Amino acid sequence: MKVTKRCFALVLGVVMLLGLCSTAFAAGAFSDIANNAYYAQAVDFCIEHGLIGGTDDGIFSPDTALSRGMLATILWRLEGRPEAPGDTFSDVVPDAYYDAPVRWAASAKIVTGYGGGRFGPDDPIRRQELAAMLYRYAEYRGEDMTVSAAEPFADEDAISDYAQNAAKWARANGIISGKPGNQFDPTGSATRAEAVTMVYRCIRWMQSEAETPSPDPVPAPGGKTLVAYFSATGTTRNAAQTVAGVTAGDLYEILPAVPYTSADLNWNDSSSRSQVEQRSSNARPAISGSVEDMDAYDVVFLGYPIWNGRPPRIISTFLESYDFSGKTIVTFCTSASSSHSDSGLRALAPGATWLDGRRLSGMSQASVESWVDGLPLPTSHQQNDEGMVISVRSGDVEIVYMLNDSDAAKALYAQLPLTLEVEPYSSNEMIFYPPAKLTTANTPLSDSRPGSLSYYAPWGDVVMFYAVGAPNSSLYELGTAVSGQENISSLGKTVTVAAK
């Protein structure tokens, strides 16, 4: 039976709630995933919401092939772990982790197997199989699968008949991108990084189809804003990115000098590191690094999870590390059940103005915007954004852009400098993902011309066009290349984006 789009939002909400209660690590805690990797945000989402786990303690193995059984399991978990009626395949081991997921996927006609009663649960999933399973899952969800015109892959003739529509749908909706040379590589194995990225994009596409877009966010009034946060599992990181996008603030992650392990976060063990720290009001876990030029900030949003009813002790370390006199501090927290608390924090920064904070777990971006808009923030100095010029550089290759005066451009400019990964998309653009989403208020639509720097709101990626692209009502103009436009397609994998 197909499920309505409204129900999908409810199912995803349940998955998100389960993710808030999980102690699994998000991408930042995996030693083999850089924070600026193109797939880091997707791994963050899938780990946080309990869709997939690591392969070992602190290891994600992004370049390892994903198995067919694991993809069925991801979709089954996304669906809310439904009952799995029906017979299984002859090579599906009873009670294996993929047993119920594969039986459910077969009954929902998301998987069909190889024939002869075989499924191949441990086989690496091929890229065309991945596209086909996501396509069938979206069909099962009752989505409109009408495919608009999409540029064909150079190796389209090599795509099997059963996956032709799926490949076109995935490309047209930004779920899958080609490899160098505009190749789809249909029989190539999909890595865990590639697979979670495609799953994440599929979820975002279904969300955009199911939900009415929230109003464009309004940047907070006031002086320069810092959004500092501590996130042990990634939940608070996502909330902080939302706050930074709404306020056009700079993001700063409070990193412990000694990272927390899963054993450290075992709430059922009274001798675990987190439990010992929370029982001691004098505990001050050391912080790695520091905020550059704290004096430049007038407003500090401070985010953290709630541990045993109070902020983690590392937040006390942060507050005692700087002089907050004359600054405004606004706290926000994430928790599956506990209410907001800044217990014991205000005394650590007595010279600051403290505003009432909020628990952000489960709040939509529109709700966060409404909360921030209602805060009595200071109106001291405003950033002068006239003549915002940025550089995107990789080695000797540099592209210089003049940003426009839009809110989205200002929000991007406020996050600089950035070092992150870029990836080719289609045959006319390179894309990268800024840490925080950009507000699109007062931002014109992009005409997708060569040299345009644009922002695709549904995915949160910045697009550098080097050839003509298709117009899109969700694509916003950030600026125009003033030099180096001809070198966009030659950028290396890692770039530095900075103000000129």
Image (spheres, rainbow, N blue to C red):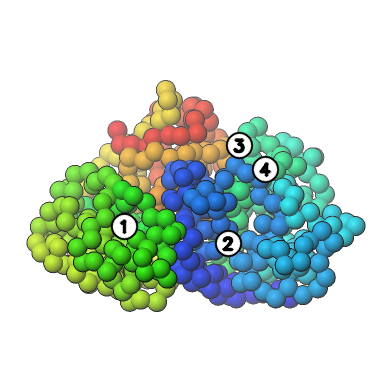
Q: Residue type at mark 4: give it.
A: Glu
Q: Residue type at mark 2: give it.
A: Leu
View extreme (front): residue: 271
Q: Residues within 10 Å of mark 2 (few under 14, many from 20)?
A: many
Distance of label 4 from label 1 (alpha carbons): 41 Å
| Nearer to us: label 2 or label 4 | 2
Q: Are marks 2 and 3 in contact (CB under 8 Å)?
A: no
Q: Earlier in the sequence, mark 1 or mark 2?
A: 2
Distance of label 3 from label 4 (alpha carbons): 9 Å
Q: Are marks 3 and 4 in contact (CB under 8 Å)?
A: yes
Residue at image point 15% right, 52% down: 322
The residue carrying mark 2 is 51
Count the labels in the image.
Answer: 4
Q: Earlier in the sequence, mark 3 or mark 1?
A: 1
Q: Position of residue 395 (x, y in %)?
A: 42, 25
Question: Foreground residue, 498 or 70?
Answer: 70
The residue carrying mark 4 is 151
- For mark 1, give the secondary structure: strand
Residue 203 lies left or right of residue 339; in this view the side is: right
Distance of label 2 from label 3 (alpha carbons): 31 Å
Residue at image point 21% right, 52% down: 224
| Nearer to us: label 2 or label 3 | 2
Residue 64, image quadrant:
top right
